[in-house]
Amino acid sequence: MRVKDGVLKYGFVGPTLIFLIAFNIFPLFYNIYLSFTDAELSGGIAQLVGGRNYGVIFDDTRYGTALRTTGLFVVLAVATELLLGFALALALQKPFWGKPAITTILLVPMMLSPAVMGLYWNFILNGHYGVVNQALSVFGLYQPQWLTDPDLKLFSILMIDIWMWTPFMMLIALAGLNAIPNHLYEAAAIDRASRWTVFRRITLPLCSPLLFLAVLLRTTDALKQFDLVMAVTGPNDRATQTLSALLYQVMFRGYKIGLGSSYSIVILLIVIALATIFIRYITSIQAKQGRESA
């Protein structure tokens, strides 16, 4: 008996659609509902409170501090990772002896769990027995308290994040560089164009859509930074408390499910807004390149 194309199509799509609704769409709308209630982990019947939770968020000084910390973290981390990753990709663009081994070694940090790496670096940066300060003491240099000095805590987490995610930027940039047709470089060589001209007119413009995609992915991920903060300094440290860490503190330490849900919706809206801006910019770049090549 022959199965109709329509039945077969819905047979393949149906399970995926059910999975999407059950694990993505329903939790999202339920979270939106909870954000308008006073639900708590301690129990009791949740009551609708309207937009009171959102008013509490914007009146809370912790929100402003966490927002500034998150913004600073995202800008510094993503910008540094982009520059270092692109520089490494340029260095690895041409074939040379040992390139596969070096590339593999550089990609290792990206493959490891952020929580585990946070604990690992917690040991390395410990002010008393950490490897970094032990090495500094050998040369008689100043030994900073990386994880207890309020001025260095965020820098330490930034350093760990850059170490972990620069390879991600490098990988995407390397894919963009390898996708550039060789005949463009050959034509530039015939015209005796300088390296700077080749980089400015060929490499950077053709690589920019993928670079912006990498920035988009890293920005949305960095906005949700929680693992490293939790493992290195804990969610309650005001010097390193990101929005996700504050959400954890409110929801799971303060037992306020409704208020915590409001925080999660605010974070989601920030991510959606930034993603929309990046996607429109990437689309405009691709459209411009399409017009120029036509």
Image (cartoon, helix red, strand yellow):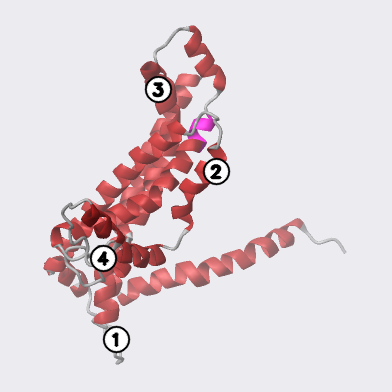
Residue at 46% over, 60% down? 112
Labelled pair 4, 1 in contact (Cβ < 8 Å):
no
Res 117 quadrant in image: bottom left
Q: CA distance from mark 3 to mark 4?
A: 42 Å
Residue at 30% over, 60% down? 131
Query: Would you call the spot at circle 2 few (<14 residues within 10 Å), some (14-19), or many (20 or more)?
Result: few
Residue range corresponding to the magenta coloring: 175-179
State the mark number for residue 46: 1
Q: Secondary structure at mark 4?
A: loop
> Percent from the top left, x then y, of residue 143?
18, 57
Q: CA distance from mark 1 to mark 3?
A: 59 Å
Q: Which residue is mark 2?
A: 101
Which label sits in the foreground, 2 or 3? 2
State the mark number for residue 199: 3
Which kind of residue does numbered mark 3 sit on? Answer: Phe
> Percent from the top left, x then y, of residue 43?
31, 91
Q: Secondary structure at mark 1?
A: loop
Q: Secondary structure at mark 2?
A: helix
Labelled pair 3, 4 in contact (Cβ < 8 Å):
no
